[in-house]
Amino acid sequence: MVVVLKNPAHPAEVRSLVSWLEGMGLDIHVTVGRETTILGLVGDTSMVDIDLIQALDIVEEVKRIQEPYKKANRKFHTEDTVVDVSGVPVGGGHFALIAGPCSVESEEQIIRVAQAVKASGANLLRGGAFKPRTSPYAFQGLGAEGLKLLLEAKKATGLPIVSEIMDLTQLPLFEDVDLLQVGARNMQNFDLLRELGRTQKPVLLKRGLSSTLQELLMSAEYIMAGGNENVILCERGIRTFETYTRNTLDLSAIPSLKALTHLPVIVDPSHATGIARMVPPLALAATAAGTDGLIIEVHNDPPHALCDGPQSITPAQFDEVAAGIRQVLPYAYRYGA
């Protein structure tokens, strides 16, 4: 249930109303916007008398919310959330360009790529240390050593780092990682999501291979229900009947999620198709569709990459993509995408 207060709402009256509602056993989420104040009522609202609340002088409107996700719901929080990733804002008109190799392979490799993508305009560095692979015989990443190398690249470039966490037992290792990525396979690892909810670390939550948008938002709700509202959603392609590409990039997810939630929405065009030559056009298309950022795999030697070389672009190709993105962005913002 959402209670929209009249503008301006006196702080003392708001506190009194919140206290009264909490006395009904409800959790109250208060959002103070530029033009209005909204109270989100979370819990069993079936016995709440809407007419009684509507009759209060301070109240403008009362609405019941049918969707099961409450904290992620735009009806509770009308303004876009901006997630701060170690000084890099994501969402609310702030575009994040995340780039780097699928997997950290060596200190020289990750630092070279980090320097190149930063020079092209990237403001966050991605790199996998722990890699969930379909085959148990495939390269699984360098683990803790990979995280150390990522931190070395951060020291060399100043770029905040993004890396995938696979299990809640790994949390102590990720203490210095700026943005914790939850991969598609772990989108519904609810024990991990609950634990991430107890931290205040920003979380990049990827959509599952066959998950609906509501299921993605419910996974975000697990994190937010624990008290961590620093969540960024990522569309990375879903499994369809098409086999030509690795996955099918659902560009419609961008405006759909923008209507449903206040959380930032970014796109991964690399995993979406698994084909490097498709990354640039899909990156530009996602930008035009209104994404809050992109996460792109960049490798200095894709043919010899230990992981996902076929979908990785070179630093020179990334430089061209970044230049194209800068040209498209003004149009995306102009038309309110």
Image (spheres, grey):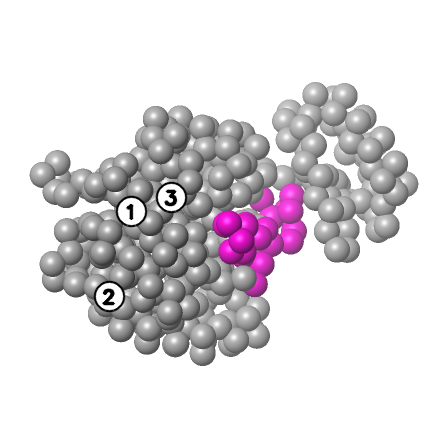
In the rendered image, residue 39, in percent from the top left (x then y), is placed at: 72, 39
Q: Residue at x 40, y 26 (%)?
A: 191
Q: Is residue 260 visible?
A: no
Q: Is residue 72 left or right of residue 246?
A: right
Instruction: Say which element carries label 3.
Output: strand
In this figure, which residue is indicated by the disc labeled 1? 149
Reply above or below: 289 against 258: below
Instruction: Say which element carries label 1.
Output: helix
Q: Is residue 1 magenta?
A: no
User: What kind of residue is marked 3?
Assistant: Gln
In this figure, which residue is indicated by the disc labeled 2? 313
CA distance separating discs 2 and 1? 21 Å
Q: Residue at x 49, y 63 (%)?
A: 95
Q: Residue at x 9, y 39 (%)?
A: 137
User: What kind of residue is marked 1?
Assistant: Leu
User: What kind of residue is marked 2?
Assistant: Ile
Number of other residues with Cα within 10 Å of mark 3, as a class: few under 14, some 14 to 19, many 20 or more: many
Instruction: Say which element carries label 2.
Output: loop
The region drawn magenta spans 73-93
Q: Foreground mark, 3 or 1?
A: 1
Tell which residue pokes out farthest to the right in this image: 57
Reply above or below: 124 against 12: below
